[in-house]
Amino acid sequence: MSTRKEYLKRKKKRRPPQRRKWLIPLIILLVLVLCAGAGLLIWYFLRSRPVPEDTLRSYFSMLSDGDYSGMYGLLTDNSKDSLSEEDFISRNQNIYEGIEATNIKVTFPSEDSDSKDTAAVTYSTSMDTCAGFVSFDNQATLEKNKDGEYRIAWDSTLIFPSLQDDYKVRVSAETAQRGSIYDRNGTALATQGTVSEVGLVPGKMNSDRTADIQKIAELLDMDEEDISTRLSASYVQDDTFVPLKQISKDDTDTESKLLEIPGILINDATERVYPLGEAAGHLTGYVQSVTAEELEEKQGQGYHSGSVIGKAGLELAFEDTLRAIDGSSVNIVDSEGEVVETIASQEAQNGEDIYVTIDASVQQTAYDQFASDVGTAAAMNPKTGEILALVSAPGYDPNEFIMGMSDARWNELSNAGTKPLTNRFSASWVPGSTFKALTAVIGVDSGKIDPAENLGFDGLSWQKDESWGDYHVTTLTDYGDQATLENALVYSDNIYFAKAALNIGADTLIEDFKAMGFGEEIPFELKLTSSTYDDDDSIDSDIQLADTGYGQGQLLVNPVHMLSMYSLFVNEGSMIQPTLLYQDGYTGKIWKENVFSADAAETVKNDLIQVIENPSGTGASARIDGVSLLGKTGTAEIKDSQTDTDGIERGWFICETAGDTDTPIAVVGMVEDVKDKGGSSYVTEKVRNITADYFSK
């Protein structure tokens, strides 16, 4: 008998071998790899097969890049035999660039999967043009070349379906008119007007042109070479009128001298004109031809290479309202010039006129007063905020930019020491003693100034204590020992307001400065520099605090902002918002409401009236019989130290109607240096003349 151990051993030898479980997954994986490889081979075969749509995609991609030579390379040999590369480039470039085609896009409704020797491909094209958006369906025929690559059987229908090879594409333009700018009374500040266009008729000139060209160049401020170049242009014939320059219709002296020269012809032309000239140059600004950069920035907004655009002042601020959108149409015409199809059209849209709050009479008077100085003036209705005048002197004549300015004239304006191209009413300046009225109202409103309190007489030089070293606050007038608020304003006492500022404290001053709009963008149609009290948002020392109290230190105030701040004296402590856009029946909008109490504003207002009414007041020369005015003079010293005798003195004066009147006005003026002109009294007289002229009409 065999043992159990032997039995089990024999049974194990008879057990069939187990299946290898890993074999089936391996087989599946191999099948998948083979299928994927076959798929890749099929994909590669299909991918590498020439597709006619790809050739068209390349063609139109080159068109978008302006690669006309590359486009020509995708044509069939037969097409190239019938059309030279030069003619191909000329036709395509003239058409696409002539209609200002941009954003060219091509789509294919379906792809042809059959590899034929000749393929007809349907596609859709869209683009922007000078006359608007264009879209159309088209069809192209492509043929395989000897290398099996698709090439385009080209004719002009590839550009537009109805364009035959002997047809042309023409752009017709309709000029629109830019809107005019009028003052509150309908007087034109910028409009379309008539100018004199000066030109030459070569056949009527002297045989020796040299002397005549030299004289013309002098009279028109042109370069002699420029005139000669214009006369030698290829289009010029003996009877051709060759335009040189436009001049004002009022320039009769230049016109008469020009007409003495043989060949000169002067015609009327329509152009943008600025009737007030340099008196309102910085206010109106001017227009010029749009630049390439501006065209790119404003793409799709209706501008084209011949458009004009506002460059400064009101022309820039109200560009979207004033701008004219010229009308145009893109037409296909046959060999007889008859229109076959209008591809796109856009009607002309005239710009809208605008009316501004400016009073042209006040503007002219203000400029006349300051024209011989370097400075600025502004006038406002303090009850409504309507700006009546904005002057920067010396100014520039915007008509010069329109009629053509020589490089020499541009350099003269750019390099002049008086900087006539600098807009001074948009800047901010050290306000000097005109700011004392605002320190006063802050102190009265906060309770830190008792109007009746006598701060005592300390002579004409004072310092807080010895910690100030050699620094002293100085004042000009010894008016006695009654240093009250009224006297301090009437006699413009620097020491009183230095003490007042120290009593008020930096924190309170800064808080109220911010409440009055310091550091903010002034809400106004033209860009104005913000008023500031320091470049780091703090008042860092007692000396700076004291100086700030009487309008020095680090203070910088914009003239328009100054008018708004002074409006609080006649608006019960609220500041009016300045505005330039005229609205019939406009009653004003408060910018900063209840900045100070009505009582505090009234107290300071009455003292400011005495600045003018008191015969000893610094503004007494501004008094106008029958008109109640408040005001304040100011002299801002710009120097490196107290001992500096070479520094400049900016003279200020601001006045405002204080009583009830149907014609309220506030006027501020500043001259950059009045040291040798009588100080602030020099400006006081000018501002008074503007105000008096306003009430005399």
Image (cartoon, grey):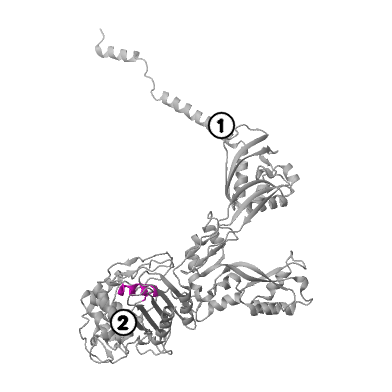
- Residue 626 x %, y %: 36, 82
Q: Is residue 346 above or below residue 417?
A: above
Residue interval drawn in magenta: 556-570
Mark 2 closeness class: few <14, some 14–19, many ≥20 residues within 10 Å: many
Query: Residue 254 or 213: which is nearer the viewer?
Result: 254
Question: SS for tag 2?
Answer: helix
- Looking at the rendered structure, the kind of residue marked 2 is Ile
Residue lying at the far top in this picture: please name it.
1
- Label count reads 2
Q: Is residue 482 left or right of residue 561?
A: left
- Looking at the rendered structure, the kind of residue marked 1 is Ile
Residue 95 appears anywhere in the view: yes
Q: What residue is disc 1 on?
A: 42
User: Mark 2 or mark 1, which has the lower sequence index?
Assistant: 1
Q: Is residue 33 left or right of residue 440?
A: right
- Residue 119 x %, y %: 66, 35
Residue lying at the far right in this picture: please name it.
207
Query: Residue shown at 29%/67% (left/top)?
Result: 593
Query: Residue 530 or 394: which is nearer the viewer?
Result: 394
Question: SS for tag 1?
Answer: helix
- Residue 485 x %, y %: 25, 83
- Residue 291 x %, y %: 56, 63
In front: label 2 or label 1: 2
Image disc number at residue 609: 2
